[in-house]
DNA sequence: TTCTGGCACTCGTGACCTTTGAGTGCCAAG
DNA sequence: CTTGGCACTCAAAGGTCACGAGTGCCAGAA
């Protein structure tokens, strides 16, 4: 295995490269870090690290840059998570506390993350999958037209228009509303289908069609809206990517526009702990030169959604991870309060 | 004034420059267009055009490129709006017809515009300013907690939580709901405040506080949500901006992230007709090298919101304007149907 | 065995020069 | 007013060259 010092050399290389954006050589390393050995020794170590695939040379006579594998080792073994400073924490809390509704919380979170990490931020809306129903409302807009409003415990509201096969009386509607709510309020989305399945039978023949239609729409909403939405921000930070970035930035922007791609990306992250995907570890090609740092957040113990940042593989991992973790925590608190 | 032929030369310059992205010289012009005169003549015309400020030379011995003023003349006098082809129109309609709700309409419109124009698309959500109230719903979530749901004729739904000063009975709530709706349904937002102002008086002493609170929240929602929201897409098209674009793209991305800026931008456009703002005509500095093509759209005769694209000043104006106009029309149709 | 200093070698970078050619302005003649 | 001719300009492209950071390897010291 790699000796202690070689790991130290790798750490130094990553740190320097992240700072300078330039390949780092043996001499510069010994000057900037107290490794206690000569450049020649470092050269040997570097050769070994290169053999193992942790670093690489852009061209024969240049310094080394970390490979994806090198960053991986750095993140796993060499880097901690750098906690934010107290003023930073305070700023986060103040900024998030000003939010007025769910949309606003998400919007503020995106801005915050982008600003703190100086990278592209991605925040998923709290998921409906694990949510419970807070209320279902039915409004008669016309004799045969009902609006269905679904309110979740995460504060999200979804509405659907329902065209009924037959006119539906106000009393029947109130009846349906009452029974529906008594069955599903407080229950999880996933449980709703079986909870309402026998509901039409208890209505009069004439109304059954309409009841079924309404219920069908409700179930549809539950399924459909389990597809997550998300918000991104800080794309201007992409310009800090690199010098050659016309080629780099394009596929990233494209990937960011594909919500499906991003959702999959976040979905791959583990629920509980912070996940870092480096370069080619990302399935999507356009993101092969980026790293994704993501973590779940939620009002309680359970994560209801995820958030994270997308940046160049050459990023300040400890700092980024610290910011992501901190923001996730505070957002969780805010959600729990509301 | 400028002779007929000189205008023709300007048109040719704009067209060639938009196509090739390279300064265009007198010789190339005569070869690619049948102007019926020699390069020398064209040179004289170009000198005149340059004197008037319609074109400029990047460096002393290069071809000419149009100035903002040149584009302006081109758009005003020389260019028509290029209608879309029938297949294109059909594609638009098919794509938009698939939308399931307002969010979806807007999302699809953005994608469509971005794809058609290969530029950055901006679509404003239908405004609440000119909207009318379709329905107001009040839900008792807890004894002293009411959810207010506002449904507009444009299909938008806004909700607010209201914490009441005192518990509020279900009957009083139903009463308020009924009276409120009978007064405001079908009315314009701007008319609502005076329509409800004497409502608290007709309630019992105990409930007046709550009624006032609910009404205050309603009015607040009306005002607050008159702030428009918008959706942007096609940012990946920014990479087609130019060769030097690290410097160009940055401020544009930043401007695009500032919703306020964009809203102001769209707001400046006239309601009825298509507006083209070229380069420095845009107040925001970051957009000084871009042009904005915007137009209002709406379900009826009145425009309820605007949409448009942001692209380099060097853009295909006739084509872009055609696409923007067509999309706006079809979106209007879709909104009218729903 | 590990570290170190020395040394020859590599090769991308930047400075500097030259060439090339598209494009220009001007002028005198058609 | 148009045209062909002509001298001039200048960015872009290509070539040469010295520089220097960085490397690998080796022999000797620790």
Image (tube, coloured by chain):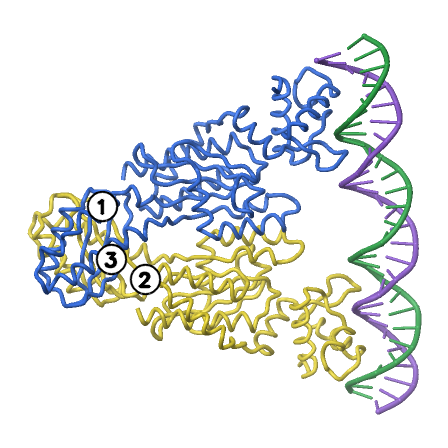
Chain colours: A yellow, B blue, C green, D purple
Does residue B100 appear left or right of residue B177 in this picture? right
Q: Are marks 1 and 3 in contact (CB under 8 Å)?
A: no
- In the image, is residue B41 above or below residue A9? above
Q: Are marks 2 and 1 on the same chain?
A: no
Sequence-wise, the earlier of marks 1 and 3 is 1
x and y percent of residue A161 in the render? Answer: 23, 47
x and y percent of residue B298 in the render? Answer: 33, 37
Query: Looking at this view, is A117 or A22 the one in front?
Result: A117
x and y percent of residue C17 in the render? Answer: 91, 45
Q: Chain of mark 3?
A: B
Q: Are marks 3 and 2 on the same chain?
A: no
Does residue B38 appear left or right of residue A132 in this picture? right
Q: Quadrant of residue B146?
A: bottom left
Return the residue at label 3: B217
Does residue D30 appear left or right of residue B121 in this picture? right
Q: Chain of mark 2?
A: A
**Spatial separation of the CA atoms under disc 2 and disc 1:** 28 Å
């Amino acid at each position: 295995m790699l000796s202690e010092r070689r790991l130290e050399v790798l750490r130094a290389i990553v740190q320097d490269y992240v700072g300078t954006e330039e390949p780092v050589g043996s001499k510069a390393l010994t000057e900037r870090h107290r490794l206690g050995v000569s450049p020649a020794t470092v050269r040997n170590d570097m050769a070994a690290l290169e053999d193992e695939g942790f670093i690489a040379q852009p061209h024969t006579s240049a310094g080394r840059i970390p490979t994806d594998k090198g960053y991986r080792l750095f993140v796993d073994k060499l880097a901690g998570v750098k906690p934010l400073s107290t003023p930073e924490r305070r700023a986060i809390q103040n900024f998030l506390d000003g939010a007025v509704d769910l949309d606003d919380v998400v919007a503020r979170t995106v801005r915050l993350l982008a600003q703190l990490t100086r990278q592209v931020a991605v925040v998923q809306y709290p998921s409906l999958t694990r949510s419970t129903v807070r209320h279902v409302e039915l409004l008669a807009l016309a004799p045969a037209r009902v609006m269905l409003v679904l309110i979740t415990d995460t504060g999200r509201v979804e509405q659907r228009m329902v065209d009924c096969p037959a006119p539906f009386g106000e009393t029947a509607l109130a009846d349906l509303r009452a029974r529906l709510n008594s069955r599903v309020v407080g229950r999880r989305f996933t449980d709703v289908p079986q909870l309402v399945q026998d509901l039409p039978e208890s209505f009069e023949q004439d109304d059954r069609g309409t009841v079924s239609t309404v219920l069908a729409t409700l179930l549809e909403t539950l399924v459909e809206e389990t597809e997550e939405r998300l918000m991104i921000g800080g794309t201007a930070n992409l310009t800090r990517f690199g010098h050659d970035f016309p080629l780099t930035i394009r596929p990233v922007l494209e990937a960011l526009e594909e919500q499906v791609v991003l959702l999959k990306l976040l979905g791959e992250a583990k629920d509980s702990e912070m996940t870092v995907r480096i370069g080619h570890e990302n399935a999507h090609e356009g993101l092969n030169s980026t790293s994704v740092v993501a973590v779940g957040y939620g009002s309680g113990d359970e994560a209801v959604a995820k958030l994270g940042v997308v940046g160049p593989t050459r990023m300040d991992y400890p700092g980024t991870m610290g910011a992501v973790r901190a923001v996730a925590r505070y957002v969780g608190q805010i959600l729990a309060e509301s």
